Image (tube, rainbow, N blue to C red):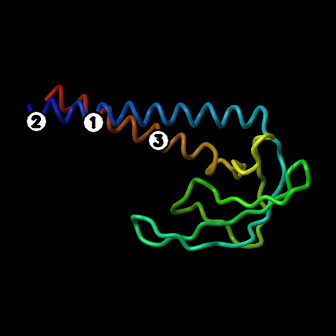
Amino acid sequence: MSGTLGAVLCGGAGVFLLGCALSEGVQMRRLRRHGRHTHGVVVDNVRVSSEDGPEWVPVIEFLDHRGHRVEFKPRMRGSGMGLATGLTVPVIYPPHNPQRARVRMWRHMTGPVVVMACAAAVFLAVGVFIVVH
């Protein structure tokens, strides 16, 4: 019974993460096709608390197509995601919602999709392993 429960939980987590990866992939594709491209400047790095302890998150400022100043923090965080203060970075944002901007770098746009897809594959593989053994 516990093996079945484990397989169901791992399978459910895998399917959920796969759905999240697909959703994020669709959003990134839509953003690449219809988003507005500009450049922003890292104006600050703020300290935030996470489960793994404190981490530094860059604050990026850019001007949208209407000339309004917009600040945002990248969604992708963690090791290797930091950006130095004063650095100019490529930015892409939906024309109707500049607050949902993303840093237009592989590690910030494609990285989340790859990480979630790999995690989904691991959970699904563990679920299959539990069922087979």
Give the total of numbered labels.
3
**Which residue does the numbered mark 2 point to in the structure image?**
2
Q: Residues within 10 Å of mark 2 (few under 14, many from 20)?
A: few
**Kind of residue sitting beneath label 2:** Ser
Quadrant that contains the C terminus: top left
**How far is mark 3 from mark 2, CA to CA?**
26 Å
Where residue 46 appears, as percent x and y from the top left, is: 61, 72
- Asked whether the beta carbons under mark 2 and mark 1 sit within 8 Å of each other, the answer is no
The residue at 34%/37% (across/down) is 13
Q: Is residue 4 above or below residue 59?
A: above
| Of 83 and 102, the residue lying toward us | 102
| Mark 1, residue position | 10
Secondary structure of the residue carrying tag 3 is helix
Q: Would you name the residue on which mark 3 appears?
A: 116
Q: Position of residue 1 (x, y in %)?
A: 8, 31
Please tell me how crowded label 3 is: few (under 14), some (14-19), or many (20+) other residues with Cα within 10 Å.
many
Mark positioned earlier in the residue sequence (3 or 2):
2
- Left or right of 47 in this view: 68: right
Amino acid carrying mark 3 in the image: Met
